[in-house]
Image (tube, rainbow, N blue to C red):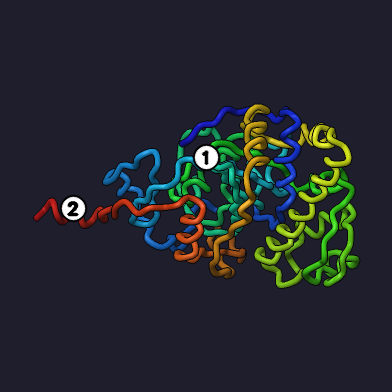
Amino acid sequence: MRRFEKTKVFITVGGAVLAIILLFFGINIIEDKMDQRAYAENFDEDEDDEEEDYYELAEDEIKIGSTIYKFDSSSKNYLIIGTDKSGSTEDDNEYHGKMADFLLLVTINRLDNNYAFLQIDRDTVTEVPMMTADGTAYAKATQQICTAHYYGGNEEESCENTVDAVSLMLGGIPIEGYYSLNMEQIPKLNHIVGGVTVTVSSDLTAADPTLIEGETITLSDEQAYNYVHSRMNVADGSNQDRMRRQHEYMDGYLQKIIDNTKANPNFPNVAFKEMMDCAQTNMSGNDISKILNRISQGENLGIKTFEGAHKLGMLLGDGIEHQEFYIDYDSFLNVMTELYKLEEVRSVPQAEEEESEEEE
């Protein structure tokens, strides 16, 4: 497991801009008492853990299905985690993490400073590491990736387990740091910039009667919360619709940051101070300053998402149907190649084939 320095967030002014990206997450609370006997169909050609002994990866290689790929190691990755309001409290005897409802991977190329975002559907079915409370022992289950934050003995370990789950899903892509914020901070973040203007793209009146499809409005703090997090009983009820609204809000929010900073160069510092005690990260102020410096010199290549199929399922074994998202393999490979310039290196023999050859 990749171990990260555990640092409570008290970072420099640059953190304000990075924190802004954290606005775009939603909520679909899953019961705390999850059945760890979860099961599901594996993603494409994933093999059993025993096969890991049959190959070794170089530092610039990842494994997707049964194929080893070389990736562009000049790219550095940072995971933005948005959590819901589930999980244990400080008064509980046993810690349980929240659901990681929003996952955004920021990818920055160190050579040209161009950057892109990979927005990951929180319902994506994948292998999830299940860290124990002492942070040492592991098992794995195939279930929604949002559950990765449930495991661990504290908030830092939940974030680390989420980082491991995302890296594992992406074939082993290294992730250098994480920044986590709870969705309850959306109103506060919206207030800092004086509201964000959007054209309401879905019928959200079931969640907020003032959010009428087709109208262009500057969102109040309460409206921003409803616009970004509402899912059940609005529009088509899918996380895909919510992710689209999150994207729209993010575009508007970043523009408000630019406008506010032009009017007051000290605005990022003011915004950061407002949020400095709300986040969890393993990155220092110097780390974030370097990231923002590169971003300021590069080109935004946009937000990427995987295509796939949504369905209701019962992977969690709690007797309740939950949304599940299965990534289309071709879409996965296309997006990964676009982000990391993948080059096929070799195929990995199946363990069974290796054993057969040895017997012959």
- Vertical comparison of 253 with 294: above or below: below
What residue lies at 56% left-to-right and 56% top-to-bottom? 144
On the image, the x and y values in percent for residue 343 come to 38, 53
For label 2, the residue is 355
Q: In the rendered picture of this protein, how many numbered marks are placed on residues?
A: 2
Whole-percent x and y of residue 276? 77, 32
Disc 1 and disc 2: Cα gap in Å?
43 Å
Numbered badge on residue 111:
1
Instruction: Please tell me which residue lies in front, 20 or 88.
Output: 20
Amino acid type of the residue tagged 2 in the rendering: Glu
Q: What residue type is labelled 1?
A: Leu
From the viewer's side, name the closer residue of 354 and 344.
344
Q: Nearer the viewer, residue 31 or 345?
A: 345
**Would you say 307 lies left or right of 55 here?**
right
Identified at 81% across, 32% down, the residue is: 269
Q: Position of residue 29 (x, y in %)?
A: 69, 55
The structure residue drawn at horizontal position 59% and vertical position 58%, both measured from the top left corner, is: 304
Residue 319: % across, % down: 59, 63
**Residue at position x 68%, y 47% in the image:** 82
Q: Is residue 265 above or below residue 358?
A: above
Whether residue 196 is visible here, answered yes or no, is: yes
Observer-nearest residue: 202 or 234? Answer: 202
216 on left or right of 244:
right
Residue 122 visible to the viewer: no
Q: Check the picture and name the quadrant holding the C terminus.
A: bottom left
